[in-house]
């Protein structure tokens, strides 16, 4: 795949070092869950399940939900 | 130090997701909305006593502010998740520069998060879908999405493990083939959902689905390029241009 044929001079592209999983984990847990909650509100709230009662969230994101491919109603 | 780097990548991922969301929003408004409107007028003509009699949110708001909220939040959320996945993928998936890793990750995300679930449970316009089956359809759609993402991650890990034995090329071929076979089995065994009304215009359905797909291609393509640029600048602060011109100069000599 990435077979670099570059000469072993300064022109070789800088390849990244790995980030330790321990440094990623706290961010992944907290922000991962936060992002999933956001996706839930855009994609599924007041469809199959509801945290907030009524139809307002569903109706507000109605067009986005259809066009983003989520089952809507 | 590393934690700060993860934070910076996460912030850039969410910003790139917002930017890509704006691009997808333009596509959604100009390509998608006309089919949504046509589908709604079909719905109105066929189900006069529909529960949408009392409009909570007007069509004008749904197709502008509502659409923007949904698409932008979706972009930010997936941008954040993709940035976290990027932190793990960086330097682990192969010998790729930060920018190339970002584009590769976005391409895989487009396939795993959207295209694969879409092939089994495609996006549907208003008027398509029975309200009584919303629970089942939502479960199946999210199941397909989670399955596809987990299998893609699994295939990547298996592929990496096979590299010492098979080499990069064949390890990749085997991993992708394994992914395709398992996805094929899921497609075959998960229940079929087809709730398109018999007289629903085929061209509207086709245009709607095509524009939904176009939105995602633009979203993930835009994200890969934007985030790749931001990540490259963060991780390799050295100006890349001087390097490239030097490479060209040595190559022509």
Image: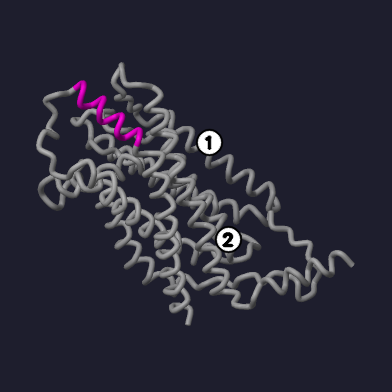
Q: Give the quadrant of residue B234.
A: bottom right
Q: How many marks?
A: 2
- Image position, residue A26 (x, y; %): 37, 72
Distance in Å between CA atoms under marks 1 and 2:
25 Å
- Residue placed farthest to the bottom in the image? B1
Q: Is residue A16 left or right of residue B215?
A: right
Q: Is residue B163 left or right of residue B157?
A: right
Query: Residue under mark 1: which chain is it in?
Result: B
Q: Give the quadrant of residue A63.
A: top left
Residue placed most toward the observer, A63 or B179: A63
- Give me the residue at 46% from left, 39% from top: B116
Earlier-in-chain disc, 1 versus 2? 2
- Image position, residue B105 (x, y; %): 53, 56
- Image position, residue B13 (x, y; %): 44, 64
* Secondary structure under the numbered disc 1 in the rendered image: helix
Q: Is residue B56 left or right of residue B212?
A: left
Instruction: Name the mark on residue B167.
Output: none
Residue B210: in magenta span: no
Residue B37: in magenta span: yes
Instruction: Name the mark on residue B101.
Output: 2
Q: Which residue is mark 1?
A: B181
* Secondary structure under the numbered disc 2 in the rendered image: helix
Magenta highlight range: B34-46
Q: Residues within 10 Å of mark 1 (few under 14, many from 20)?
A: few
- Image position, residue A11 (x, y; %): 75, 72
């Amino acid at each position: 795949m990435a077979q670099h044929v570059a000469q072993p001079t300064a022109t070789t592209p800088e390849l990244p070092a790995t980030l330790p999983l321990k440094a990623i984990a706290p961010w992944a847990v907290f922000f991962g869950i936060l992002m999933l909650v956001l996706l839930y509100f855009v994609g599924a709230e007041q469809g199959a399940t509801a945290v907030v009662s009524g139809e307002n969230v569903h109706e507000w994101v109605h067009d986005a939900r259809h066009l983003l491919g989520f089952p809507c109603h | 130090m590393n934690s700060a780097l993860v934070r910076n990548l996460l912030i850039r991922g969410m910003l790139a997701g917002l930017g890509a969301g704006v691009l997808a929003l333009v596509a959604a408004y100009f390509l998608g909305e006309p089919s949504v409107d046509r589908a709604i007028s079909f719905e109105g003509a066929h189900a006069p006593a529909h529960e949408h009699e009392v409009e909570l949110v007007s069509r004008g708001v749904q197709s502008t502010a509502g659409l923007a909220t949904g698409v932008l939040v979706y972009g930010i959320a997936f941008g954040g998740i993709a940035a976290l996945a990027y932190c793990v993928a960086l330097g682990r998936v192969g010998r790729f520069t930060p920018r190339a890793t970002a584009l590769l990750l976005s391409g895989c995300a487009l396939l795993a998060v959207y295209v694969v679930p879409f092939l089994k449970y495609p996006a549907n316009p208003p008027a398509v879908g029975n309200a009584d089956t919303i629970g089942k359809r939502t479960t199946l759609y999210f199941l397909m999405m989670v399955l596809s993402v987990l299998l893609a991650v699994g295939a990547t890990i298996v592929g990496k493990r096979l590299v010492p034995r098979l080499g990069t090329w064949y390890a990749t071929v085997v991993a992708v083939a394994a992914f395709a076979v398992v996805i094929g089995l899921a497609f075959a065994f998960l229940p079929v959902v087809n709730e398109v009304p018999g007289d629903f215009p085929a061209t509207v359905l086709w245009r709607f689905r095509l524009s939904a797909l176009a939105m995602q291609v633009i979203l993930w393509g835009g994200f890969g390029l934007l985030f790749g640029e931001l990540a490259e600048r963060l991780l390799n602060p050295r100006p890349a241009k001087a390097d490239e011109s030097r490479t060209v100069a040595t190559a022509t000599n």
